Image (cartoon, rainbow, N blue to C red):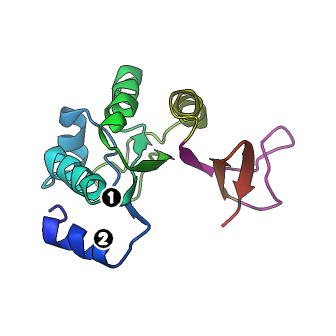
Amino acid sequence: MHCTEKSINKLADLNADTVCCNLETINEDVFNFVKPGETLNDRIETCQGVSDAGIELSSGLLVGLGESLEDRIAHLRYLNNFETLGEIPIMGFNPYKDTPMANHPPSPLEEQLKIMAVTRIMYPEKSSTVKLKIYCRNENTMKFRKNTKTGFLSRRFDAFRIMIP
């Protein structure tokens, strides 16, 4: 179910700064497989409604669902349709127990970082974030802080920063 025009207009009336509606993938076959009961078109209409209402839109990708690199690039290009796009989150798929995709492999960190690099090239003026799941196994593993398992890498303005939840 997508946000109605009335709901979006109410958010605009309340001066909402940003609305996040992640398309996750624009590959309709992948979307229908991972989101049964939802439609990609509903998500797109919600994003367009947010943009049409003049509210900043945050809309990103979920890497590792089964989409191709070409799908990811097409998704990034598609985001140009939204005039108020302000942030592009890059998220990696992580399986959860007792769900239909429990046995699907998690998204490799390298794939998330690759698409983040492409995002930065395509949208240098936009904010983009990537949530990283970091496992501190040995000395050669990237560490943000001792015993930290998750972190956010965000680019705002001209500097990268690490945000630890």
Question: Do the CB atoms of the residues marked 1 and 2 lie less than 8 Å apart?
Answer: yes
- Secondary structure beneath dot 2 equals helix
Pick whichever, 86 or 65, lies toward us. 86
**Which quadrant of the rendered structure holds the C terminus?**
bottom right
Kind of residue at disc 2: Ala
Measured from the top left, where is residue 118 in percent x and y? 54, 27
Is 30 included in the stretch rendered in magenta?
no
Q: How many marks?
A: 2
Circle 2 residues within 10 Å: few <14, some 14–19, many ≥20: some
Q: Which residue is mark 1?
A: 54
**Which quadrant of the rendered structure holds the N terminus?**
bottom left
Kind of residue at disc 1: Gly
- What label does residue 22 carry, if any? none
Q: Which residue is mark 2?
A: 12
Measured from the top left, where is residue 6 in percent x and y? 15, 71
Pick whichever, 106 or 20, lies toward us. 20
